[in-house]
Image: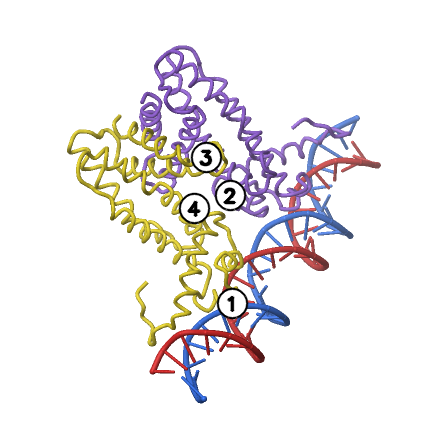
Chain colours: A purple, B yellow, C red, D blue
Amino acid sequence: MADTRARPRRADAERSIARIVAGARAALSRDPDATVDDIAAAAGVGRMTVYGHFRTRPELVEAALADALRAGEEKLAGVDLEGDPRHVLTRLLGSSWSLVSESNALLSAAEKVLPEGRVRQLHAAAADRVERLIRRGQRDGVFRTDLPITWMVNVIQHVLHGAAEEVRTGRVRERDVPDLVTKTVLSILSG
Amino acid sequence: MADTRARPRRADAERSIARIVAGARAALSRDPDATVDDIAAAAGVGRMTVYGHFRTRPELVEAALADALRAGEEKLAGVDLEGDPRHVLTRLLGSSWSLVSESNALLSAAEKVLPEGRVRQLHAAAADRVERLIRRGQRDGVFRTDLPITWMVNVIQHVLHGAAEEVRTGRVRERDVPDLVTKTVLSILSG
DNA sequence: GCTAACTCGTACGTGTGTGTACGAGTTAAC
DNA sequence: GTTAACTCGTACACACACGTACGAGTTAGC
């Protein structure tokens, strides 16, 4: 993340890195086993250019995951957190379900190559945001308290993952997802 | 499945096949990318014995999946389907959540190597059972009707998958799963 | 316009998993 | 007890992905 190099990168290098990371996100979301070659193709650069900026595939996977999480944080930061937790959650899910499901695919790619615990560490901030919201909803008395919070967070994640899968296999239209997901998740949280 | 060979297999061969299939289920559930070597080790036989009965790895994966689904069907067949659909579902989930979660891992292994659609074809019978139950619950007025049935079936599947993951990572105790899953799923189906 | 940075193709060495070939030893079936 | 089936080790050919080495061509930065 932080640029700790002696000399600053040239503009075209910066551009390449951005394309590579974007390509990695795209390729790894489609297939967690995507090769460096696949990623280079998705990024529209040569494989050697990739190795010019990332020493190993795991390093690349981590960069892609970190970038996706950063983008998620950014998007979520723009969501109004005031008011009824149920409405907040609806807004949150509506604006981020696709991103979360992308992260999920990346997460599974990362779990295969990154050291134990590293994934959860990177992912902690995102999970924490949802967790706080649920806690507030519980205090306000609109969300149930008979299920562990970590469980609920996890289930939400899996529901989103399921939604992405349904879209991929063509059984659910993309524009129907927010409604389905919202109804489902609110049912779970309201008891 | 059906034995279409000219001569019947010898008893020891039959035994080997059973061990191999069991080993494949175990190994692939732990890791969908398990190698033929891993599977042979899990089965307690040599790799060459595996190739003596299964020509290719995909063939082996399919056999493992088919066997797991068959075992699932068998287990589910023993569940009383009479009475309140909610109670039936509770019994169903309680007795099969671990099996379903195993199938899920196998399913993902299968999706990588089996031709498009083959997986869903094999899995259809299992999904169908849950689907019929939900439909009955809708007729009885205890399950919601504002969500597509295929969506609900899919979500249940993902909830179970999530449960298995929580157990694997040690954040949920195995004996707490039935209660968590039941509460969660009933919330979803009841609206 | 000079220079260093960057792109990226070709080629290579390595590791690993698949599936085949061979063959010696073991065991079920009659 | 004879035979055919079965087990399973060693060895091998093959494919494929990773990561490195080299080097020629291109481009940003001053």
Q: Which residue is mark 1?
A: B48
Quarter assignment of residue B53: bottom left
Q: Which residue is mark 3?
A: B166
Where is B42 relative to B10, above or below?
above
Looking at the rendered structure, whether the residues under marks 2 and 3 are on a common chain is answered as no
Where is A137 relative to A148, above or below?
above
Q: Position of residue B135 (x, y in %)?
A: 20, 37
Q: The disc labelled 1 sits on which kind of residue? A: Met
* Disc 4 element: helix
Looking at the rendered structure, whether the residues under marks 4 and 1 are on a common chain is answered as yes
Q: Position of residue C11 (x, y in %)?
A: 70, 59
Q: Earlier in the sequence, mark 4 or mark 1?
A: 1
* Disc 3 element: helix
Q: Which residue is mark 2?
A: A32
In percent of the image, x 58 and y 44: which residue is there?
Answer: A40
Question: In the shown orientation, is residue B132 left or right of residue A160?
Answer: left
Q: The disc labelled 2 sits on which kind of residue? A: Pro
Query: On what subunit does the disc labeled 3 rest?
Result: B
* Disc 1 element: helix
Q: Which residue is mark 4?
A: B105
Query: On what subunit does the disc labeled 4 rest?
Result: B
Q: Are marks 2 and 3 in contact (CB under 8 Å)?
A: no
Q: The disc labelled 3 sits on which kind of residue? A: Glu
Spatial distance from mark 2 to mark 3, Cα to Cα?
21 Å
In percent of the image, x 67 and y 34: which residue is there?
Answer: A13
Query: On what subunit does the disc labeled 2 rest?
Result: A
Q: Residues within 10 Å of mark 3 (few under 14, many from 20)?
A: some
Where is A88 relative to A122, above or below?
above
Spatial distance from mark 3 to mark 1, Cα to Cα?
36 Å
